[in-house]
Amino acid sequence: MRALPTIEIQVCVPCMLTFGRGPARALGGRGGESDTAGANHPCPAFRRTRFPPTAARGSGAHVMWLTLIYSCTGGAALLYALYRWVIPAAVQYHGGLALFWHDVVVERMLDTLTQSTRPQRLLGAVQRNATRGDPRSVVKAIDQFCRQKEWAMNVGDEKGCILDSVVAEVNPAAVLELGTYCGYSTVRMASLLPPHAKIITLEFNPANAAVARQVIAWAGVEEKVHLVEGASGDWIPKLKEQFGIKTFDLVFLDHWKDRYLPDTKLMEECGLLRKGSVLLADNVICPGTPDYLEYVRSSPLFKSQYFKSHLEYTKVEDGLEKSVFLG
């Protein structure tokens, strides 16, 4: 009895073509391309699969399944490459696109897939990678998470160095932070404060505040920090009474951008600023705070200086505005 030959199938997924040798010629592709066509096919992305003689009758189904598997695998790889590298690189230089991609598309997608929030995932990265009681290792763990895993709107490592220099220059005893988020800048500032100095940090979102408390505790700086939940407009008039604060040496603004100007005027009205108090405002270019910038740059009550930098973990221009209250 004549032996049945081995079947060899060549599959080109991008072109949706199959090429056969011998009996396999009639099994694949558009019009049953020959083995010579397979050998001369210019696309390098095809595979060879050999079928034993007993599988000859079912080889057509194998080709269909192989094509489906290769197509799904290639599609998944393409989507992952777009998500992980291509789109993030494309939005690096455009503020609006960067914020929409990272703060809307990616965050909502990962929230749905992981059934967790971005602050919770950031906290997990801190607990896995940072040394308990070491604030600088906490800052480093968050920076690594935001650059390598998932973007988050902290002040970031680049602008963080500017924040560090201002804190070191002012050497404040009393600090007010508007917008705690996950506690990144709180930890960063607290690690530089002199003994017995205090930070009062306000966070509107209770879920963010819960995460921030754990990050601050992990860093070991909780004794220097009072974290208050609530709206800045509600709390600023009550700070003197609640905490015995007369004035603040440094105020770091990093909350809702449309609150920068009204909260600054509210602090003036409540007498929380003394001559020499420093206001340091983040994200004054991206997303931007044009009304606040116009006020502090034109008001005789302030002397302002702009520190050019980039939006956290991107190449989009952003910066910090340092304004000294002249009284």
Image (cartoon, grey):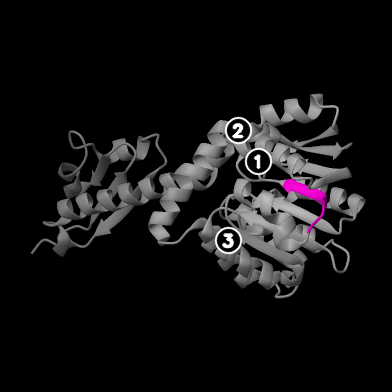
Tell me where residue 84 appears, x and y as whole percent. Answer: 51, 48
The mark that comes first in sequence, 3 or 1, is: 3
Which three-letter amino acid code belongs to the residue tagged 1?
Answer: Thr
Front of the two marks 1 and 2: 2
Q: Is residue 81 visible?
A: no
- Magenta stretch, residue numbers: 245-252
Which three-letter amino acid code belongs to the residue tagged 2?
Answer: Gly
Location of residue 239 with respect to 233 vertically, above or below: below
Residue beneath disc 3: 209
Residue beneath disc 1: 314
- Is 145 positioned to the left or the right of 110 in the image? right
Specify the farthest residue to the left. 1
Quarter residue 140 falls in: bottom right
Contact (CB < 8 A) between labels 1 and 2?
A: yes
Gap between marks 3 and 2 measured at Cα: 27 Å
Tell me where residue 95 appears, x and y as whole percent. Answer: 60, 33
